[in-house]
Amino acid sequence: MSGLKIVTIGGGSSYTPEIVEGFIRRYEELPVRELWLVDIETGKEKLEIIGNLAKRMVKKAGVPIAIYTTLNRREALPNADFVTTQFRVGSLDARIKDERIPLRHGYIGQETNGAGGMFKALRTIPVMLEIDQDMAELCPDAWLINFTNPSGIVTEGVLRYGKTKKIIGLCNVPIGMEMGVAKLFDVDSNRIRIDFAGLNHMVFGLSAYMDGNDITKSVIDKIADGKMGSTVKNIMNIDWVPEFVAGLSIIPCPYHRYYFKRQEMLEKELEEFSKGETRAEIVKKLEDDLFQLYKDPALDSKPPQLEQRGGAYYSDAACRLISSIYNDKGDIQPVDTRNNGALAGISPESVVEVSCVITKNGPRPLTMGELPIEINGLVQQIKSFERVVIDAAVTGDYNKALLAMTINPLVSSDTMAKVLLDEMLEAHQKDLPQFSAYFASKG
């Protein structure tokens, strides 16, 4: 049968209208025949709302994409060409815990970095490995496009412990950075390209180009002048010290504020925490408002309010990536994939976030060589953290989990790591079955 079958796991997500819009806009080059939206029982109502909106969007566009919804992913997966993942184990209530528990002890609470990011990975990797098992059986030739955060850690978890090697991680941060640079120069983002290198949420722009001409120095100067704020909705915009950016001489991503402006970011988060306004709580309210919009039977397009959610361009980036694989475009996109020598000093099988040539055989990382000495140490430290988190997520080894928490530069204390680990394990017990031996030992 002609046309593509695509399965989106986490189909009841508020982001789904964007991926539907992306497939509609690209229909001529990416002939999607079936789009299956999959969720779990607790997401049933949202899945129904999203499914109905998706059907209205497709009808309005006049494209022959059949929309299916199911709570059984094994029903959806057979013979899929691409599978995308965009789910949150424990829903936004789990994110609230990830943010509030560390803040209660004076540590940054963030959903993909530090203690919060670690626990999101612990909850997510086992579920991704179950999906991987099902795919190996039901659609072994499918590509898995993962934008479930923390994307780099989750992608590496599947590559190290799963069966499929056709997995690519995706993040909207590099896309947002390219769009931010385009805005600085008031040009279309298609004219901007950045050489990205690093890890997910620890990625740097080594060089920036406009129409093929190197504009890195001009970009650095504008960032130093405070003209480019945070390009991610969920990260506060605190201006960099100009001399720091000049000394760094490469383009930082918004998440670097958690490491290079840790105290200022913590103070801001503690202020929000005291008001009961952590980012997770704000997002929960945004989600409620979005789903009220989505329910409207007259709505047949992606509402502009979705951009306030914080994940703008994620889904469109996924559509772009799928199209480039399907059409063997050979264009350059930043993705999370096996290093394979792209970054010297990081093992070949480790996952890095790097600019890649996208082909029908997947991403081919561009060789970036040694990372600048100014950033290499921090990147290596985060990679150590990621590796130990993955092992802890698969084995349920308490000691490994404690080690991972301590290695993270946003914690850096074995004493406090143990306090945070114990509280967060207790808070997330129902979503951490691999730690059953630890919980049994606690009686």
Image (tube, grey):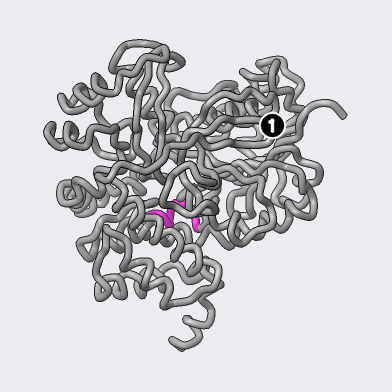
Q: Residue at the right extreme?
A: 1
Residue ID at (41%, 73%): 426
Horizontal side of 38 relative to 174 (left or right) equals right
Which amino acid does the dot numbered 1 rest on? Lys
Rendering quarter of residue 50: top right
Rendering quarter of residue 315: top right
Asked whether 186 falls inside the magenta stretch, the response is no
Image: 414 above or below 98: below
Percent x, y of residue 242 = 13, 31
Secondary structure under badge 1? loop
Viewer-proximal residue among 29 and 101? 29
Q: On the rendered image, what quadrant is the N terminus found in?
A: top right
Percent x, y of residue 161 = 61, 62
Q: Is residue 46 visible?
A: no
Q: Which residues are magenta?
A: 90-95
Percent x, y of residue 167 = 62, 46
Q: Crowdedness of circle 1 by 10 Å Cα count: few (<14), some, many (20+)?
A: some
Viewer-proximal residue among 50 and 66? 66
